Image (spheres, rainbow, N blue to C red):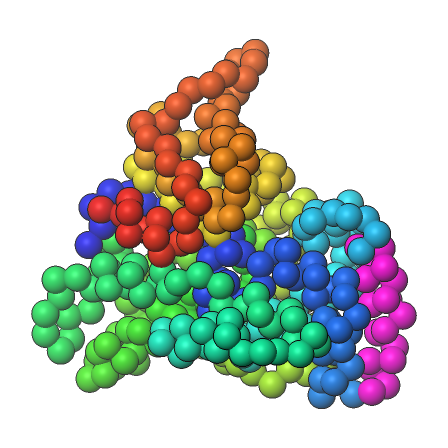
Amino acid sequence: MIDKKTVFVLGAGASCPYGYPSGARLRERVCLSQGFILSYNTSRIAAQIRETRLQDINKFKDAFNKSRIKSIDLFMAHNPKLASIGKYIIAFEILRAEQKSLFGEEAKLEQETLEYMNRSPLDLLSRSLFQGEDWCYLLYNRLIEGLVGKDALPDFSNVNIAFVTFNYDRSLEQYLYEALRYSFIEVSEERIVQALNQLKILHVYGKIASLKWQNQIDYVDYKPKVSESLLQRAANNIRTIYEEKQNPELIQAQNLLKQAEEIFFLGFGYADENMEVLGLPDLIPPRCEVYGTAFNMIPEEVKRVFSKLHSRQTRDKRVHLAPAATRIDNLDCLMLLRKYLN
């Protein structure tokens, strides 16, 4: 088990090992004609609805492409009149990725297949899927470490971990549900759900929908058939950067960070706007140990991230006050946890 109060802050990179796009790949899919529009036009959405939507979609695509803004969330925040169609596009991309998502050995096999197959140019965007190793596997096995017996479920009410995620997808929730359900086959569904509901997983910007174990009434099964009504429903659950104040989970997330003894940034881009939303770095306790991935960053970029995490607001100016320990490494999520998670 994990002895310290530990908060995992998840960015898009944390979902990449399971088939979801990074922020950069999402931008490519939106801006390239062989990306979102191609997938949307070949979807099962009624042709009449697609035709109605395409004018707004092309307007968004053209503006986002020429804006050169790297984050679709930040672009929508700057252009609130385009946010509605932007959320619709994101909902489609997340649900599309969910349809193809895989966990465990299947995800690893798919990653290796995509790396070594000679794919056509139209499949170029698929090469970047399933990036990184299966970090949830390591963390899950730490959570059930030492449990013996057919019904020895982990007590998440006494577990020192929480997740604060900037992602709209539900891969973490589905991963943990499947892992528990099939680790303890003889335990009732009700007890599995009770255990999971004690675990804090906070979505700062919302998520496309709840899973059944999270909400028995208002839920959407994992890997559902994509329909127009589902897309609109999922889009309505998504918030942009400056709408997060409407999210009660944000206050919970900030309180968890204030009390943390360890914080792990996994697949996180350290964008100023996302740091600001959580009140970082000011909310990081002085004795908190901070660890973060900096996958594919050059040393100078790592230094800038390090500096961001050490700049604190005092009464009249910002000063550099280091947490107890800070390690920002050019590692993926799994390797960072293997190296620093005690």
- Tell me which segment is drawn in magenta: 47-64
Give the mark count.
0
> Whole-percent x and y of residue 322?
39, 23
User: Quick one: which residue is furthest to the left in this view?
Assistant: 148
Residue 225 falls left or right of residue 111: right
Residue 249 or 126: which is nearer the viewer? 126
Residue 330 or 6: which is nearer the viewer? 330
Q: Residue at x 36, y 60 (%)?
A: 135
Does the stretch in magenta take in 287?
no
Q: Is residue 62 above or below residue 310?
A: below
Q: Is residue 281 visible?
A: no
> Whole-percent x and y of residue 45?
74, 85
Q: Is residue 91 above or below residue 66?
A: below
Residue 166 falls left or right of residue 146: right
> Whole-percent x and y of residue 203?
51, 55
Residue 72 or 87: which is nearer the viewer? 72
Residue 17 falls left or right of residue 240: left
The overriding secondary structure of the stretch rendered in magenta is: helix
> Whole-percent x and y of residue 112?
45, 73
Residue 51 or 108: which is nearer the viewer? 108
Q: Quadrant of residue 173?
A: bottom left
Q: Residue at x 37, y 32 (%)?
A: 326
Q: Residue at x 78, y 81 (%)?
A: 41
Does the stretch in magenta take in 59?
yes
Q: Residue at x 50, y 35 (%)?
A: 299
In the rendered image, the quadrant that contains the N terminus is bottom left
Q: Is residue 14 visible?
A: yes
